[in-house]
Image (tube, rainbow, N blue to C red):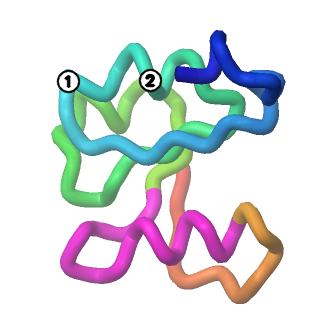
Amino acid sequence: MGNSSRYPREEVMAIGDNYNDVEMLAFAGIPFIMGNACDELKSNGWQVTLSNDECGVAAAVEQVLGLKVSGLQRF
């Protein structure tokens, strides 16, 4: 993942929705949780994007790139 690349972790974006994503999200400097993830993952303080049915990945990328923001929320 990021450790073997030339990118600092502050520049790594990760988007996850389940427990198998926790290590990746904890490493990333820009972590997002999908809106359809369980409440336990949402309670970690990571930014929450829309659900997979609402194009949550696109919404998170739009926010990071400074494009239009489509309904992100922080829990």
Image position of 21 (left or right of 71): left
Residue for badge 2: 24
**Residue at left 79%, top 37%?**
11
Amino acid type at circle 1 is: Tyr
Up-down relation of residue 73 to residue 58 (above or below): above
Residue 19: give its label.
Answer: 1
Q: Is residue 75 visible?
A: no
Up-down relation of residue 54 to residue 60 (above or below): below
Q: Quadrant of residue 38?
A: top left
**Residue at left 55%, top 84%?**
70
Please name whichever residue, 8 or 31, is drawn nearer the observer in this view of the structure. Answer: 8
Query: Mark 1 or mark 2, which is nearer the start of the sequence?
Result: 1
**Residue at left 70%, top 29%?**
29
Estimate the x, y position of residue 59 in percent, counting from the top left.
Answer: 52, 75
Up-down relation of residue 26 to residue 36 (above or below): above
Magenta residues?
49-63
